Structures are given as structure tokens and as C-alpha cells.
Image: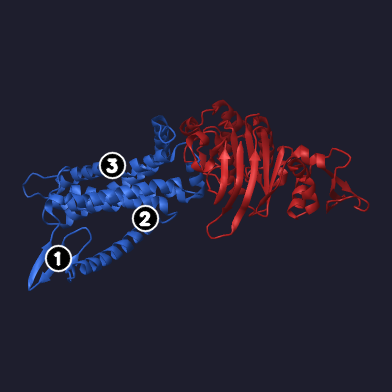
Chain colours: A red, B blue
Amino acid sequence: MIHIDNLSFGYRRGTLLFQNLHLSLSRGHIYGLLGKNGAGKSTLLKNMTGLAFPTAGTCTIDGADASKRSPEVLSNLFFLPEEIFVPSTTTAKFVSNTAIFYPKFNEEEFYQYLTEFEVPREAVMDKLSFGQQKKVMIAFGLATNTDLLVMDEPTNGLDIPSKVQFRKIIASALNEDRCVIISTHQVRDLDSLIDSLVVVHNREIVVNQEMDSIAEKLVFATLPTTDGYDVLYAEDSFQGQNVIMPNHEGVFSRVDMELFFNAIISDNQPLLQLLQKDKYENAI
Amino acid sequence: MKTQFSFTRFWWLFRKHTAENIKYYLLCAAVLIGLLVLFMGFLIMVETSPMTTDKQGVIYVFMLLAAGPIFTSTIFAHLGDKRKAIASLTLPASHFEKYLVGWIYSYVIFQVVYIACFFLVASILLPLDDWRGQEYEIMSLYSNEDGQITGLNLFFFLHSVTFLGSIFFEKWQFIKTAFIIIIIGLVVTLVNKTILQSLLGHTLDDAFPFSNLYFSEAGEYFQLRFPEKQEYILGLVLLGTSLLLWTSAYFRLREKEV
């Protein structure tokens, strides 16, 4: 659905934030976009949604140039930024004035999501708390039923029960036509939600893998000591050492995203090479 | 073509814009009425002679050229706020439709509301003035006797400048546009006189851009006028400049990044 080809981007006075980036994202997946603060997650999302223009290369959505912001592309795309704007109207009025732009908008679903998030139906939007406003916009974005749903730090400002509700709703809203991209620095918020992981680091996409594929290649475990084990990355914990090891035996383990992310941003070359092994083999 | 403009989509956008900004626009209209009442009422009180149509014309043009550019400067000011800019730029409507809604509100609707407010205030306050036994008189909208049409033409130009400024600058749109106008105005005035003097090889008394030249020779004062039959060309220059600025504003909107 999204194809980024040889994309470079930099703000006018700064150095390049991305250089020769390549990325393809498909329908039927929930992608988690991870990166350190300032790695350019939001900027990458803005390039994808046509809010920032690449200095070189292209970003297309179903073959259309994202930077053109054509109404056809925009009506099938919903972008929820980290800092949202809500007008000074009731949710009902907002829906009647805005939903019309999205051909697949489902009002029933919208109010159902609001109920699940426990947001009052007739509230004036800008009088709600930030968390409540965010929930209204998440509900609206989901109810647009656009094929591309992009969310930048959607769980910021949500309380713990709402985060649980968010994960549940997002998981239920995915279908084979939809591509959901969620950027966050709160890795745990995406636990058991995303099926693919994209990591931005050092101006590059260092990881773009399905979670199953990561689990096939790596084992995540807690060991009393790393002695005698082929450990790629380890972190101290109360129970001993949380480790990542190559999955030679085809053992299943749950991907510890936080540990995995920390390993990636520590420039763990053996781990990166192992992850990219398939890519090189396919290229040969 | 439907990608660029769809009447249905334009109507949805216009309706949404109106619903979300109506309180602000009504407040603006109330402030305008208040200022007109203050300005006109003050002059009626302090002036001993009645407020004739020529004085009304001065107020009409002055307030139009003050309020119009200030209002126009705010029309795309939301694009300077990242949160609002994202909501606006990702809304599924074309750049042209978004541009047109801003243009209609700041140029067409503003003038209609301004004229309505002016004549409302005038029709209430003027009968209260001392007309010394005469029937009170309200300035005509469609004549240029008191500078009404000239005022509208000047607003036409100032609108195009401030409209571009409202998209171009991210904050302090009016102040920055006014600053740029003053700087460009000063430079053009100075350069215009210097260039014309070097072209004619003569010292000029006065050479304001887009107007006649004045110079003295052998104790006589001369005026070099543009041919009367071709004066419309000066109007075309103004029109062309405004069209160019409006077009630039459209392309600036298309290129807007967040």
C-alpha cells in the first residue's frame, strides 16, 4: 500500500534526517514504528501522509504520490497526530460536518467506540480533557474505515484502562484491506497488538519484519547467567539476565519488544545481520 | 478535473468551515460594528458641521482598508499552528477548494458584511446628527464621488497581498505582511525615482510609482501624464499584480508542509 523509494528528507537548516530510505507497507497488517526520541518517526509519518515532502525519492500510497495530497488519497487515509486539534463543537456536529468527507465512515461504529472509551456523546470537544479528546479522535479515525490509518503516539495521554481498550479496539478494527501504522516510544503499549515491526535508527530503517519472523529467528529468554550460551544481547533483571539468542532450534518465544528495541538501538550488529539474513539470501 | 474541484466537496468544506468558525466571525462582525459606532459617533459628537457624504466616504475607505487586511491576515493563520495545519491539510478536499473557501470568506463575504455593517451603523447614527434642518444624506455605494470605488479597488490589491501573507508567514501574519509592504514600498519608491531620472536625464520633483511625473525646467513646472486613453493600463497593472499574488498564495498552500 505504501511504497517509499530512495527517500531522503531533511529540514532546511539541518542535516538529512533520512537518506535513501526504502520501505513497503502492506494491507492487513498493524505496523509498530519504533525509534528513539528525535529518530524521525513523526517526520516519516508526515512524509507518508503528504505533510512533509521528501528532498529526494518518492512516497506513494496505492501508486499515488503522497505529497500531492489529492482528495481521493486523503479520503482513504486518516492521520492522528501526537498533538491533536479539536474544534469547539459537539462530537455530533463534528461528525455531521467531517464524516461526509470519508465515504466509508460508519456512524454506528463511531458511537460504539465512544461508548467503549466511556466518552460522553454530546460533549463539546474542546471542553474535554486531552485524553478524552484523543479518544474521540481515535474513535473517529477508526470509524472512517480508511484503508490507511496512521497514528503518532496514540496512547500518549490515555490512562491505563483506556490503553487496554485502545489495544482491543485496534485489534478488532483490522481487516485484510486495512493498513494500520502506529508510532510510539512507549514500546509496551504495542504489546500483543502489532504484527509487524519497523525500527528507525541512524537515518535508516534498520528493521522491517513481521513479529512471527522475528520470533522464528530469535529466542527471548531469562537466564540466571549468560555463561555457555550464544547470547546476542543481554540486560540485567531481577530474575537474572533477559537475553536474546539466535533461534537455532526453532523454539517459540514471545518477542520482548522493549529488549529487542534496546538491542537494535545499541547497534547490535550480529543481531541486525541475523535479522537481515533472509533479505540477503533472497537477493542472491 | 474533479480532483481539483468538486462542487459537492466544496460545499461540504464551506459548511464545515462555517460551522467551526461562525462564533469567531460573528465576534469579528460585532467588533467591526463597535468600531464603526465609536469612530462615526465620536466624529458626529465633536464635529460642528454635519457628517456629509465626503466625510462618510473617508470613514468608509479608512475602516475598509484597516479592517479588511487585518481580517484577511487571519484567514490561513491556522496553518501556522501544527495541530490545526495537520487537521486542515489532511482533510479530504483539494487545495483549490480549501483556497477558495478562504478567498470567499476573506474577500467576498468580508466586503458584504463590511458594507452591511457600515450602512447599518450609518443609518442609525446619521439621523442623530444635527443636519441644520436639512434631510440627512447617506453616501451612495455605487458612486466614486466620495472614493468608495477607489477604496474597493485598493482593498482588492491589499487583499491579495495580505492573503498571500496569511499563508506565507507562520505567525504574526499581519505585522510581518505590513512590514514587508512598507519595506517594498520604500524601496520601489526610491528606486523608481532614481531609474526614471537616469532614463530621462533630468532631475524629477516627484515620481511616485504608477503615477505621473513632475519636474521643473526654466522656471516652469511640468507634469508628464500617462495618455488618458491608456489609463486603463495602470488598472491592469494593479489587477495583474493582484492576480499574481493570489496565484502565488494558491501555490504556497499546495506546498505547505508541517
Same chain, labels 2 and 3: yes
Foreground tag (3 vs 1): 1
How many other residues sit within 10 Å of disc 1, few (<14), some (14-19) or many (≥20)?
Answer: some
- Left or right for A34, reference B26: right
Q: Chain of mark 3?
A: B
Same chain, labels 3 and 1: yes
Residue B214's label in the rendered image is: 1
Q: Mark 1 belongs to which amino acid?
A: Tyr
x 44%, y 45%: residue: B254
Q: CA distance from mark 2 to mark 3?
A: 21 Å
Residue that carries the numbered disc 2 in the rendered image: B174
- Left or right for A199, reference A56: right
> Which quadrant of the figure contains the N terminus of chain B?
top left
One can see residue B65 in this view: yes
Q: Chain of mark 2?
A: B
Look at the numbered disc 2 and give the secondary structure of its residue: helix
Residues A66 and B61: in front is: A66
N-terminal of the two: label 1 or label 2? Answer: 2
One can see residue B40 in this view: no
